Amino acid sequence: MSRRALITGITGQDGSYLAEHLLGLGYEVWGLVRGQANPHVSRLRKHIGDVQITTGDLLDQGSLISAVERVQPDEVYNLGAISYVPMSWQQAELTAEVTGMGVLRMLEAIRVVSGISTSRTPGREQIRFYQASSSEMFGMVRETPQNEKTPFHPRSPYGVAKSYGHYITQNYRESYGMFAVSGILFNHESPRRGAEFVTRKVSLGAARIKLGLAAELRLGNLDARRDWGYAGDYARAMRLMLVQDAPEDFVIGTGQTQSVRELVEFAFRTAGLNWEDHVVLDAKYTRPAEVDLLCADPKKAREQLGWEPEVTFEGLVTMMVESDLRLLAESARPEDEPFSPDHW
Protein backbone atom coordinates (compact mmCIF):
# COMPACT_ATOMS: atom_id res chain seq x y z
CA MET A 1 0.00 0.00 0.00
CA SER A 2 1.13 3.57 -0.67
CA ARG A 3 2.27 5.75 2.20
CA ARG A 4 0.00 8.55 3.38
CA ALA A 5 1.34 12.03 4.13
CA LEU A 6 -0.33 14.98 5.85
CA ILE A 7 1.09 18.42 4.99
CA THR A 8 0.35 21.61 6.89
CA GLY A 9 0.96 24.72 4.82
CA ILE A 10 0.14 22.83 1.62
CA THR A 11 -1.13 25.99 -0.12
CA GLY A 12 2.26 27.67 0.25
CA GLN A 13 5.37 27.39 -1.90
CA ASP A 14 7.01 24.55 0.02
CA GLY A 15 3.80 22.60 0.52
CA SER A 16 3.03 22.64 -3.20
CA TYR A 17 6.48 21.36 -4.19
CA LEU A 18 6.43 18.70 -1.48
CA ALA A 19 2.97 17.54 -2.53
CA GLU A 20 4.14 17.24 -6.15
CA HIS A 21 7.21 15.29 -5.08
CA LEU A 22 5.31 12.86 -2.86
CA LEU A 23 2.57 12.28 -5.44
CA GLY A 24 5.28 11.45 -7.96
CA LEU A 25 6.56 8.79 -5.55
CA GLY A 26 3.11 7.21 -5.24
CA TYR A 27 2.08 8.74 -1.90
CA GLU A 28 -1.49 9.51 -0.92
CA VAL A 29 -1.23 13.21 -0.05
CA TRP A 30 -3.49 15.13 2.32
CA GLY A 31 -3.32 18.84 3.01
CA LEU A 32 -4.41 20.59 6.20
CA VAL A 33 -6.22 23.87 5.50
CA ARG A 34 -8.16 26.33 7.61
CA GLY A 35 -11.88 26.60 6.87
CA GLN A 36 -14.29 24.67 4.68
CA ALA A 37 -14.33 27.21 1.84
CA ASN A 38 -10.63 28.02 1.57
CA PRO A 39 -10.30 29.64 -1.89
CA HIS A 40 -6.76 28.40 -2.39
CA VAL A 41 -7.72 24.72 -2.44
CA SER A 42 -9.24 24.70 -5.93
CA ARG A 43 -6.25 26.60 -7.30
CA LEU A 44 -3.89 24.17 -5.59
CA ARG A 45 -5.67 21.16 -7.10
CA LYS A 46 -5.61 22.76 -10.54
CA HIS A 47 -1.82 23.03 -10.40
CA ILE A 48 -0.84 20.04 -8.26
CA GLY A 49 -3.44 17.38 -8.98
CA ASP A 50 -4.83 14.66 -6.74
CA VAL A 51 -4.50 16.15 -3.26
CA GLN A 52 -7.05 15.37 -0.55
CA ILE A 53 -7.99 17.99 2.02
CA THR A 54 -8.85 17.96 5.71
CA THR A 55 -9.57 20.98 7.87
CA GLY A 56 -7.56 22.09 10.89
CA ASP A 57 -5.78 25.05 12.41
CA LEU A 58 -2.39 25.25 14.10
CA LEU A 59 -4.06 27.51 16.68
CA ASP A 60 -6.61 24.81 17.63
CA GLN A 61 -5.37 21.66 19.37
CA GLY A 62 -8.66 19.80 19.02
CA SER A 63 -8.82 20.35 15.26
CA LEU A 64 -5.33 18.90 14.83
CA ILE A 65 -6.20 15.77 16.83
CA SER A 66 -9.31 15.32 14.67
CA ALA A 67 -7.29 15.78 11.48
CA VAL A 68 -4.64 13.23 12.47
CA GLU A 69 -7.34 10.76 13.54
CA ARG A 70 -9.15 11.17 10.24
CA VAL A 71 -6.14 10.95 7.93
CA GLN A 72 -4.14 8.31 9.86
CA PRO A 73 -0.91 9.49 8.18
CA ASP A 74 2.39 7.65 8.02
CA GLU A 75 4.18 10.98 7.78
CA VAL A 76 3.33 14.53 8.90
CA TYR A 77 5.15 17.51 7.40
CA ASN A 78 4.63 20.70 9.41
CA LEU A 79 5.30 23.49 6.93
CA GLY A 80 2.53 25.82 8.10
CA ALA A 81 3.74 29.09 9.63
CA ILE A 82 3.63 32.84 9.46
CA SER A 83 6.77 32.79 7.37
CA TYR A 84 7.32 36.38 6.25
CA VAL A 85 10.02 37.67 8.60
CA PRO A 86 9.14 41.42 8.50
CA MET A 87 5.52 40.60 9.39
CA SER A 88 6.71 38.84 12.53
CA TRP A 89 7.52 42.21 14.14
CA GLN A 90 4.05 43.51 13.28
CA GLN A 91 2.31 40.37 14.56
CA ALA A 92 4.77 39.00 17.09
CA GLU A 93 2.22 37.28 19.33
CA LEU A 94 0.43 35.59 16.44
CA THR A 95 3.79 34.50 15.01
CA ALA A 96 4.65 32.89 18.35
CA GLU A 97 1.29 31.09 18.49
CA VAL A 98 1.35 29.77 14.91
CA THR A 99 5.03 29.32 14.10
CA GLY A 100 6.09 28.25 17.60
CA MET A 101 3.19 26.83 19.58
CA GLY A 102 1.66 25.36 16.43
CA VAL A 103 4.54 22.86 16.37
CA LEU A 104 3.77 21.77 19.92
CA ARG A 105 0.09 21.36 19.10
CA MET A 106 0.85 19.14 16.11
CA LEU A 107 3.31 17.03 18.10
CA GLU A 108 0.70 16.65 20.84
CA ALA A 109 -1.91 15.61 18.26
CA ILE A 110 0.41 12.88 16.98
CA ARG A 111 1.26 11.78 20.51
CA VAL A 112 -2.38 11.61 21.61
CA VAL A 113 -3.62 9.80 18.50
CA SER A 114 -0.70 7.35 18.70
CA GLY A 115 -1.34 6.68 22.39
CA ILE A 116 2.23 7.54 23.34
CA SER A 117 2.97 8.30 27.00
CA THR A 118 6.05 8.34 29.18
CA SER A 119 5.43 4.67 29.93
CA ARG A 120 4.86 3.59 26.33
CA THR A 121 7.38 4.07 23.55
CA PRO A 122 6.14 4.07 19.95
CA GLY A 123 6.46 1.02 17.75
CA ARG A 124 8.21 0.69 14.40
CA GLU A 125 5.18 1.89 12.42
CA GLN A 126 4.83 5.18 14.30
CA ILE A 127 3.85 8.43 12.61
CA ARG A 128 6.98 10.22 11.43
CA PHE A 129 7.09 14.01 11.92
CA TYR A 130 9.01 16.66 9.97
CA GLN A 131 9.37 20.19 11.31
CA ALA A 132 10.35 23.02 8.96
CA SER A 133 13.08 24.78 10.91
CA SER A 134 14.85 27.82 9.49
CA SER A 135 18.30 29.34 9.03
CA GLU A 136 16.80 32.48 10.61
CA MET A 137 17.33 30.69 13.95
CA PHE A 138 21.08 31.32 13.57
CA GLY A 139 20.53 35.07 13.29
CA MET A 140 23.63 36.81 14.61
CA VAL A 141 25.85 33.94 13.57
CA ARG A 142 28.63 32.60 15.80
CA GLU A 143 30.44 30.87 12.92
CA THR A 144 30.33 30.61 9.15
CA PRO A 145 29.21 28.38 7.55
CA GLN A 146 26.46 27.17 9.88
CA ASN A 147 25.93 23.48 10.63
CA GLU A 148 23.73 21.36 12.88
CA LYS A 149 25.80 22.25 15.96
CA THR A 150 26.00 26.02 15.44
CA PRO A 151 24.32 27.91 18.35
CA PHE A 152 21.15 29.89 17.66
CA HIS A 153 20.86 33.67 18.10
CA PRO A 154 17.61 34.62 16.34
CA ARG A 155 17.10 38.26 15.36
CA SER A 156 13.35 38.37 14.73
CA PRO A 157 10.15 37.10 16.37
CA TYR A 158 9.97 34.64 13.47
CA GLY A 159 13.43 33.28 14.24
CA VAL A 160 12.60 33.01 17.94
CA ALA A 161 9.36 31.13 17.19
CA LYS A 162 11.17 28.77 14.82
CA SER A 163 13.77 28.11 17.52
CA TYR A 164 11.02 27.08 19.93
CA GLY A 165 9.55 24.76 17.30
CA HIS A 166 12.96 23.23 16.69
CA TYR A 167 13.66 22.60 20.37
CA ILE A 168 10.20 21.22 21.16
CA THR A 169 10.60 18.77 18.26
CA GLN A 170 13.90 17.66 19.71
CA ASN A 171 12.30 17.41 23.16
CA TYR A 172 9.47 15.15 21.97
CA ARG A 173 11.98 12.95 20.16
CA GLU A 174 14.04 12.55 23.32
CA SER A 175 11.13 12.39 25.79
CA TYR A 176 8.73 10.08 23.94
CA GLY A 177 10.92 8.28 21.43
CA MET A 178 8.97 9.84 18.56
CA PHE A 179 10.43 9.86 15.06
CA ALA A 180 10.54 13.66 14.93
CA VAL A 181 13.10 15.59 12.91
CA SER A 182 13.81 19.18 11.89
CA GLY A 183 15.18 20.35 8.59
CA ILE A 184 17.11 23.60 9.09
CA LEU A 185 16.45 24.98 5.65
CA PHE A 186 18.30 27.96 4.30
CA ASN A 187 16.55 30.37 1.92
CA HIS A 188 14.76 28.49 -0.84
CA GLU A 189 12.88 30.26 -3.59
CA SER A 190 10.90 29.61 -6.77
CA PRO A 191 8.37 31.19 -9.14
CA ARG A 192 5.79 30.19 -6.51
CA ARG A 193 7.35 32.33 -3.79
CA GLY A 194 5.04 35.04 -2.39
CA ALA A 195 5.45 38.50 -3.87
CA GLU A 196 6.38 39.96 -0.46
CA PHE A 197 9.69 38.01 -0.26
CA VAL A 198 12.77 39.82 -1.55
CA THR A 199 13.68 37.29 -4.27
CA ARG A 200 10.19 37.39 -5.76
CA LYS A 201 9.93 41.14 -5.21
CA VAL A 202 13.07 41.51 -7.31
CA SER A 203 12.00 39.11 -10.09
CA LEU A 204 8.55 40.71 -10.29
CA GLY A 205 10.07 44.19 -10.16
CA ALA A 206 12.45 43.47 -13.02
CA ALA A 207 9.62 41.94 -15.07
CA ARG A 208 7.28 44.88 -14.42
CA ILE A 209 9.92 47.42 -15.45
CA LYS A 210 10.82 45.40 -18.57
CA LEU A 211 7.15 45.32 -19.62
CA GLY A 212 6.61 49.03 -18.90
CA LEU A 213 4.34 48.37 -15.92
CA ALA A 214 6.64 50.16 -13.45
CA ALA A 215 9.60 52.55 -13.49
CA GLU A 216 11.41 51.70 -10.25
CA LEU A 217 11.87 49.07 -7.55
CA ARG A 218 12.33 50.14 -3.91
CA LEU A 219 14.48 47.93 -1.69
CA GLY A 220 16.22 48.03 1.69
CA ASN A 221 19.57 46.48 2.64
CA LEU A 222 21.45 45.34 -0.48
CA ASP A 223 24.46 44.07 1.48
CA ALA A 224 22.75 41.20 3.33
CA ARG A 225 24.02 37.83 2.10
CA ARG A 226 21.98 34.66 1.88
CA ASP A 227 22.38 31.04 0.83
CA TRP A 228 19.65 30.80 -1.84
CA GLY A 229 18.45 27.52 -3.35
CA TYR A 230 15.49 26.14 -5.29
CA ALA A 231 12.43 25.11 -3.26
CA GLY A 232 11.86 21.99 -5.38
CA ASP A 233 15.30 20.68 -4.43
CA TYR A 234 14.59 21.27 -0.74
CA ALA A 235 11.31 19.33 -0.88
CA ARG A 236 13.33 16.25 -1.82
CA ALA A 237 15.44 16.69 1.30
CA MET A 238 12.38 16.82 3.57
CA ARG A 239 11.21 13.40 2.49
CA LEU A 240 14.72 11.91 2.68
CA MET A 241 14.90 12.87 6.37
CA LEU A 242 11.79 10.83 7.13
CA VAL A 243 12.95 7.62 5.44
CA GLN A 244 16.15 7.28 7.46
CA ASP A 245 16.59 4.50 10.02
CA ALA A 246 16.92 6.96 12.90
CA PRO A 247 15.60 10.51 13.43
CA GLU A 248 18.21 13.24 13.03
CA ASP A 249 18.18 16.96 12.20
CA PHE A 250 19.84 18.27 9.05
CA VAL A 251 21.01 21.60 7.65
CA ILE A 252 19.89 22.02 4.03
CA GLY A 253 21.49 24.64 1.79
CA THR A 254 23.86 25.16 -1.12
CA GLY A 255 26.93 26.22 0.85
CA GLN A 256 27.27 29.37 -1.28
CA THR A 257 26.11 32.94 -0.64
CA GLN A 258 25.13 35.92 -2.75
CA SER A 259 24.23 39.42 -1.66
CA VAL A 260 20.88 41.04 -2.35
CA ARG A 261 22.82 43.36 -4.66
CA GLU A 262 24.07 40.36 -6.68
CA LEU A 263 20.52 39.00 -6.80
CA VAL A 264 19.24 42.33 -8.14
CA GLU A 265 22.05 42.71 -10.66
CA PHE A 266 21.56 39.23 -12.13
CA ALA A 267 17.75 39.46 -12.21
CA PHE A 268 17.81 42.80 -14.05
CA ARG A 269 20.49 41.56 -16.43
CA THR A 270 18.29 38.55 -17.20
CA ALA A 271 15.50 40.97 -18.08
CA GLY A 272 17.89 43.03 -20.25
CA LEU A 273 18.05 45.96 -17.82
CA ASN A 274 20.64 47.90 -15.82
CA TRP A 275 19.53 47.68 -12.19
CA GLU A 276 21.19 50.96 -11.19
CA ASP A 277 18.78 52.82 -13.48
CA HIS A 278 15.73 51.54 -11.62
CA VAL A 279 16.46 50.45 -8.02
CA VAL A 280 15.84 52.97 -5.22
CA LEU A 281 17.03 52.38 -1.65
CA ASP A 282 14.31 52.93 0.95
CA ALA A 283 15.03 52.75 4.70
CA LYS A 284 11.49 51.56 5.48
CA TYR A 285 12.41 48.14 4.08
CA THR A 286 15.28 47.68 6.54
CA ARG A 287 14.68 45.20 9.40
CA PRO A 288 14.84 46.41 13.04
CA ALA A 289 17.52 43.77 13.66
CA GLU A 290 19.26 42.62 10.50
CA VAL A 291 20.72 39.19 9.78
CA ASP A 292 23.79 39.97 7.70
CA LEU A 293 25.15 36.59 6.64
CA LEU A 294 23.67 33.11 6.42
CA CYS A 295 25.59 30.28 4.74
CA ALA A 296 24.89 26.56 5.11
CA ASP A 297 27.31 23.72 5.71
CA PRO A 298 25.29 20.87 4.10
CA LYS A 299 28.01 18.24 4.56
CA LYS A 300 25.88 16.00 6.80
CA ALA A 301 22.95 16.03 4.35
CA ARG A 302 25.27 15.27 1.47
CA GLU A 303 26.95 12.35 3.25
CA GLN A 304 23.97 10.78 5.08
CA LEU A 305 21.02 11.66 2.85
CA GLY A 306 22.82 11.67 -0.47
CA TRP A 307 21.20 15.05 -1.13
CA GLU A 308 22.62 17.65 -3.50
CA PRO A 309 20.94 20.76 -4.93
CA GLU A 310 20.33 20.51 -8.66
CA VAL A 311 19.42 24.12 -9.53
CA THR A 312 22.13 26.80 -9.33
CA PHE A 313 21.59 30.36 -8.10
CA GLU A 314 21.80 31.65 -11.67
CA GLY A 315 19.35 28.99 -12.85
CA LEU A 316 16.95 29.88 -10.04
CA VAL A 317 16.95 33.62 -10.75
CA THR A 318 16.57 33.02 -14.48
CA MET A 319 13.64 30.69 -13.81
CA MET A 320 11.91 33.28 -11.62
CA VAL A 321 12.40 36.26 -13.93
CA GLU A 322 11.29 34.34 -17.02
CA SER A 323 8.25 33.01 -15.16
CA ASP A 324 7.26 36.51 -14.03
CA LEU A 325 7.67 37.93 -17.52
CA ARG A 326 5.22 35.28 -18.78
CA LEU A 327 2.89 35.82 -15.83
CA LEU A 328 2.70 39.59 -16.23
CA ALA A 329 2.31 39.33 -19.99
CA GLU A 330 -0.90 37.36 -19.30
CA SER A 331 -2.11 39.26 -16.22
CA ALA A 332 -0.89 42.28 -14.29
CA ARG A 333 -2.21 40.72 -11.05
CA PRO A 334 0.28 38.21 -9.60
CA GLU A 335 -1.85 38.18 -6.45
CA ASP A 336 -4.15 35.82 -8.37
CA GLU A 337 -1.50 33.10 -8.14
CA PRO A 338 -2.54 29.82 -6.49
CA PHE A 339 0.08 29.66 -3.75
CA SER A 340 -0.99 31.69 -0.75
CA PRO A 341 1.17 33.46 1.86
CA ASP A 342 -1.62 32.73 4.37
CA HIS A 343 -1.07 29.00 4.72
CA TRP A 344 -1.06 27.88 8.33
Image: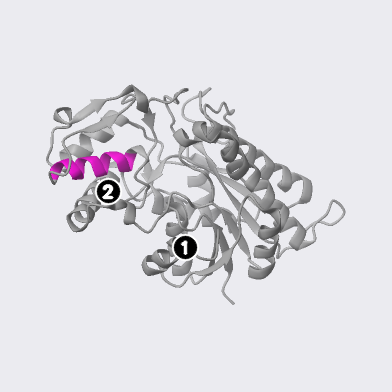
Label 1, residues with CA under 10 Å away: few <14, some 14-19, many ≥20: many
Give the CA distance from mark 2 to mark 1. Answer: 20 Å
| Majority secondary structure in the magenta region | helix
Question: Vertical placement of 151 versus 300: above or below?
Answer: above
Question: Vertical placement of 183 versus 120: above or below?
Answer: above
Side of 250 relative to 322 (left or right): right
What residue is rendered at 62% in x and 42% in y? 97
User: Looking at the rendered structure, which numbered label has been put on residue 248?
Assistant: none
What residue is rendered at 67% in x and 59% in y? 63
Dot 2: what SS? helix
What residue is rendered at 26% in x and 50% in y? 319
Dot 2 amino acid type: Met
Dot 1 amino acid type: Ala
Residue under label 2: 320
Q: Residue furthest right?
A: 119
Q: Earlier in the sequence, mark 2 or mark 1?
A: 1
Instruction: Work out which quarter of the rendered image holds the N terminus and state it.
Output: bottom right
Task: Report the span colored magenta.
Answer: 199-210
Residue 254, how many percent across, how many down?
A: 40, 40
Residue under label 1: 19
Q: Are marks 2 and 1 in contact (CB under 8 Å)?
A: no
Residue 78, how many percent across, how many down?
A: 57, 52
